[in-house]
């Protein structure tokens, strides 16, 4: 009846939320991927805590893949798309001070007006970009 | 202690992103393809992720301080400005083009090869770019 993808998605989501809850309740920090990485990259607030969070975030999928096989990423190998999209994601998330995890997961659950606004904005932009890029232009 | 739990939270986040399909760019692009072959799976991931955090914020409100002694972050000023909306729109556009947002972009770094590395490098450059763009503006305000 219900596609298994949806059930696995829901379980995965609950565990992502649990990781965010752990980071909030134990460490007292917001689990926002762009903020954690960005403040290290632009040196606005690098800490060992953030570096170790990222170390875990990179190492765990490696170990998981080593044990159970790496899942497909279906990542494009077009360098122009990768470069432009990377720049937009990096610039945009730092301008908005958050991404899917910070604004989406941590912000919405706090009923934050900024988190909800940002999430609506990046979803609407994502839907629109996909419509234009895939169906009108056929670029990606 | 603080580092250990940061490592644990990051590891759980990374492992689950990988298992739940957030690092499969075809799946993410399918979720954004609202006017095409729409795949609603990510709505369950995002919705599911919000549930434990609804509870966590309620607990946090009573704790005031986190287990390791840090004050619970106070809510940001509810400023809805151009930076928030324009930045999010740029992010959403980039998210659609390749299908990676910052968390999954880091989760695939170890096994995604040169393409993942290139995306990550560009993303880091974009983050630095924001800092460079923001500096003159800050210098101009007294």
Image (cartoon, rainbow, N blue to C red):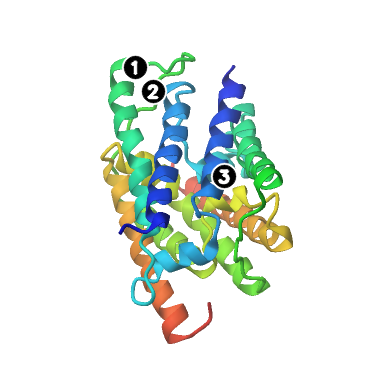
**Is residue A32 toward the left or the right of residue B73 in the image?**
right
At numbered mark 1, what does the secondary structure look like: helix, strand or loop?
loop
Label 1 resides on the chain identified as B
Q: Disc 1 and disc 3: Cα gap in Å?
A: 27 Å
- Given residues B65 and B12, the one toward you in this image is B12
Task: Give the residue at mark 2.
Answer: B72
The image shows residue B73 at horizontal and vertical percentages of: 39, 27
Q: How many marks?
A: 3
Q: Are marks 1 and 3 on the same chain?
A: no
Figure quadrant of the N terminus of chain A: bottom left
Height in image: A29 above or below B64? below
Residue drawn at x 37%, y 72% is A128
Q: Are marks 1 and 2 in contact (CB under 8 Å)?
A: yes
Q: Disc 1 and disc 2: Cα gap in Å?
A: 6 Å
Residue drawn at x 47%, y 62% is B28
Disc 2 residue crowd, few under 14, some 14–19, many 20+, Cα 10 Å = many
The image shows residue A115 at horizontal and vertical percentages of: 33, 46
Q: Disc 2 and disc 3: Cα gap in Å?
A: 21 Å
User: Nearer the N terminus, badge 1 or badge 2?
Assistant: 1
Residue drawn at x 34%, y 76% is B35
Task: Give the residue at mark 3.
Answer: A38
The image shows residue B117 at horizontal and vertical percentages of: 70, 57
At numbered mark 2, what does the secondary structure look like: helix, strand or loop?
loop
Task: Give the residue at mark 1.
Answer: B64
């Amino acid at each position: 009846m219900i596609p298994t993808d949806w059930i696995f998605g829901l379980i995965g989501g609950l565990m992502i939320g649990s990781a965010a809850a752990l980071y909030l309740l134990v460490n007292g920090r917001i689990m926002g991927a762009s903020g954690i990485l960005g403040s290290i990259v632009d040196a606005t607030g690098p800490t060992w805590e953030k570096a170790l969070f990222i170390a875990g975030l990179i190492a765990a999928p490696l170990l998981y893949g080593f044990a159970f096989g790496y899942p497909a990423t279906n990542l494009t190998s077009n360098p122009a798309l990768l470069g432009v999209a990377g720049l937009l994601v990096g610039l945009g998330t730092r301008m908005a001070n958050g991404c899917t995890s910070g604004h989406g997961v941590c912000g919405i659950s706090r009923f934050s007006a900024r988190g909800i606004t940002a999430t609506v904005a990046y979803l609407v932009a994502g839907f629109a970009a996909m419509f234009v890029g895939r169906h009108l232009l056929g670029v990606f | 202690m603080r580092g250990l739990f940061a490592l644990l939270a990051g590891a759980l986040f990374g492992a689950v992103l990988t298992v739940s399909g957030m690092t499969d760019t075809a799946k993410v692009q399918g979720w954004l393809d609202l006017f095409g072959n729409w795949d609603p799976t990510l709505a369950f991931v995002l919705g599911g992720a919000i549930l434990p955090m609804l509870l966590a914020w309620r607990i946090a409100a009573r704790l005031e301080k986190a287990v390791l002694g840090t004050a619970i972050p106070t809510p940001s000023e509810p400023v809805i400005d151009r930076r928030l909306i324009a930045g999010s729109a740029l992010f959403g556009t980039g998210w659609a083009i390749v299908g990676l947002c910052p968390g999954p972009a880091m989760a695939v770094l170890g096994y995604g090869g040169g393409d993942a590395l290139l995306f990550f490098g560009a993303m880091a450059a974009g983050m630095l770019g924001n800092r460079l763009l923001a500096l003159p503006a800050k210098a101009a305000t007294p």
